[in-house]
Amino acid sequence: MFGIEERLREKGVSVDSMVASAMLLYVPHGLGAEDAAHKIREKILKYLEDPNVASLLLGAILLEDELFFRQKDSGIQDDPVFLLSDEIIGMAIAECIGGTYARFEFTRYDQKKPGILATLGPFLDDAVAGLIAGCTSRLYSECC
């Protein structure tokens, strides 16, 4: 959908890197790490095709390109506390995939920024964290 997987890859975010980041905070729920990584990969690929998730990810990519890279004087280079739209996008992606529980999972990934998340700008780190959190939250709900 919208070539979102390719657009993310152009930004240095591969499906493999998202799965690896997800696994850094994985909490075993009756699945071994290998099986969990496989299921998380499937969920990430599935939700990259969802038009709602893909459009929010695209929005984050475009906002980051414009406000973080093109407009160096935008005031968001250091992800200031007054910037909330990045968090809102991340929470929206997480909740779209995994419901209310995913918002709490998003907070874990947003605060710890494991793996690829630590290398991304203010919009993309939260959007990708939302994708990962939504998918892991859904996995946890399905495993119980």
Image (tube, rainbow, N blue to C red):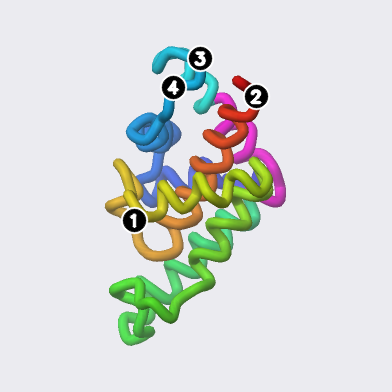
Which secondary structure, mark 3?
loop
Q: Position of residue 68 (x, y in %)?
A: 37, 72
Mark carried by residue 120: 1
Mark carried by residue 142: 2
> What is the C-alpha distance between the residues marked 3 and 4?
6 Å
Left-right relation of 4 to 120: right
Mark carried by residue 30: 3
Does 23 appear above or below 74? above
At x 53% / y 57%, what residue is drawn? 90
The one of 99 and 80 positioned closer to us in this rendering: 99
The one of 90 and 60 positioned closer to us in this rendering: 90
Q: Amino acid at mark 3?
A: Gly
Q: Are marks 3 and 4 in contact (CB under 8 Å)?
A: yes
Q: Are marks 3 and 2 in contact (CB under 8 Å)?
A: no
Q: Amino acid at mark 4?
A: Pro
At x 32% / y 86%, what residue is drawn? 73
> What is the C-alpha distance between the residues marked 1 and 3?
31 Å
> What is the C-alpha distance between the residues marked 1 and 4?
27 Å
Which is more N-terminal, label 4 or label 1? 4
Which is more N-terminal, label 3 or label 1? 3
Structural crowding at the residue carrying mark 2, measured as other residues with C-alpha within 10 Å and reported as few (<14), some (14–19) or many (≥20): few
Structural crowding at the residue carrying mark 1, measured as other residues with C-alpha within 10 Å and reported as few (<14), some (14–19) or many (≥20): some
- Residue 69 image-quadrant placement: bottom left
Q: Position of residue 31 (x, y in %)?
A: 49, 14
Which secondary structure, mark 2?
helix
> What is the C-alpha distance between the residues marked 2 and 4?
13 Å
Q: Amino acid at mark 1?
A: Leu
> What is the C-alpha distance between the residues marked 1 and 2?
29 Å
Q: Are marks 1 and 3 in contact (CB under 8 Å)?
A: no
Pair 1/3: label in front: 3
Which secondary structure, mark 4?
loop
Residue 52 is a magenta residue: yes
